[in-house]
Image (cartoon, helix red, strand yellow):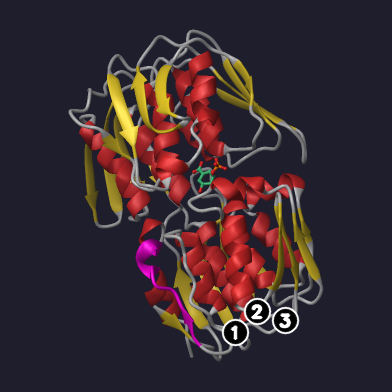
Amino acid sequence: MRFNKCNGLCGEVTVPGDKSISHRSVMFGSIAEGVTEVRNYLRGADCLSTISCFRKMGIEIENRGSVVTVRGRGLRGLSRPDEVLDCGNSGTTIRLISGILAAQDFDVTLTGDASIQRRPMKRITEPLSRMGASIESTNGCAPLRISGRRLHGISYTSAVASAQVKSAILLAGLYADGETRVTEPFLSRNHSEIMLSHFGADVRTEAEAAGPASITIRPAENLHGSLVEVPGDISSAAFFLCAGLMVPHSEILIRNVGINPTRAGILTVIRDMGGDITLLNERAGSGEPTADILVRSSSLRGTVIEGGLIPTLIDELPMIAAMACLADGTTVIRDAAELKVKESNRIAVMAQSLTAMGADVTETEDGMIIRGGKPLHGAVIDSHSDHRIAMTFAVTGLIAEGETEIPDAECVNISYPRFYEDLAGLMK
Ligand code: S3P
């Protein structure tokens, strides 16, 4: 796919449903009793992997129009799949399902694509094993062979602020013989806590502002199915937020975006950089705050992004790094070593690709230093089949001189199948 300089982006866009919330709605709906109706479920490849795994464990899931209906069979209602569960490219699927499967009365193997088989799984197998789970991995990576066991509650301190780690432990905690507590260095996205409470679980959070957070869950007798309204994904909206700021003569209204504070760090960064954004029509949704966001082209300045802000914008950092190339002054991203173990090594890939376009970027151990203001030119960008890298460079291509080519562009199907159509729809 090829991208060229653009004269402005104008109009409205509605981004697809939130990926993290969509996954959780099917997972929690499957182990709840009764029907869970999910509105605005994300039909991206990752969330379809989650549906496919639960269907293979006997759960009836209808996936029609914009509504997904899950007929839950209760905490003990999953059946042993006849085949390996393929989680595709989805870290959320493999890590969260592991927490549920650790407590079932059957054995199962989980795997995924080449990227998933490189990503670290010890961060979940270690705490789950401490709870009594039996998990065999291949050098700490997938495939994972899980044999269900009776689990004990633990108190676990995670070295990383990871919602996937936290959620895997909390899900196992539903089945444990006592309370389970997870402490993380900063509060990571809290969609599991919100939705599990909504489904009737006893979950409590103690969080210090910009400091550690502890989440406690009590074993559950049952969960009850519920209605879930999935807000638009702020991680998908991020591409239009930054495109609107970066491309001159732009004004974009992005409708129905989830702005949960554990996800909305990009809004803080945009304000720190001097970007013109306005939140309109703020509302509560089903426990997940939502708003429309109006963005206009802006002159930007460099900033520092670090500490507790990082988990609230971890998936947006590739796009933010590209935007920082246009800012006046230097942007420093630190405390973001987690970027190295995403769908690709996003520190290395961003530094190499932005440099190929003429930017002044230094890769560091835990982030990047970006000296803004150098004019960018088109290049051929290897997305490493990473959806967020492909979308980042589709947007960056709109402000570069000459042509930007992304050969493996269809990887956006993971989280935003209509991305290129929606972007083209805004072009003047
Ligand atoms: C996610 C958590 C984050 C994020 C990922 C989705 C989730 O990963 O990067 O895209 O749904 O819980 P980590 O938990 O590894 O930080």
Q: Amino acid at mark 3?
A: Lys
Q: For the N terminus, give its image quadrant.
A: bottom left
- Circle 3 crowding by C-alpha within 10 Å: few under 14, some 14–19, many from 20: some
Query: The residue tagged with tag 2: helix, strand or loop?
Result: loop
Q: Is residue 351 above or below residue 177?
A: below
Marks 2 and 3 close (CB-CB < 8 Å): yes
Q: Residues within 10 Å of mark 1 (few under 14, many from 20)?
A: many
Stretch of the chain drawn in magenta: 403-412
Is residue 411 on the magenta stretch?
Answer: yes
Q: Residue furthest front?
A: 139
The residues bearing labels 2 and 3 have C-alpha atoms spaced at a distance of 7 Å
Q: Which residue was labeled with disc 3?
A: 374
Residue 18 is labelled as none
Q: Amino acid at mark 1?
A: His
Image coordinates of residue 17 in percent, x first then y, are 42, 55
Task: Give above or below for 66 relative to 152.
Answer: below
Nearest to the eye among marks 2 and 3: give it.
2
Amino acid carrying label 2: it is Gly
Q: Nearer the viewer, residue 39 or 141?
A: 141
Residue that badge 2 annotates: 358
Sequence-earlier tag: 2 or 3: 2
Closer to us: 376 or 233: 376
Q: Where residue 52 appears, x then y in whole percent? A: 26, 41
Above or below, 85 against 373 in this view is above
Whether residue 319 is visible to the viewer of this picture, yes or no, is no
Earlier-in-chain disc, 1 versus 2: 2
For label 1, the residue is: 377
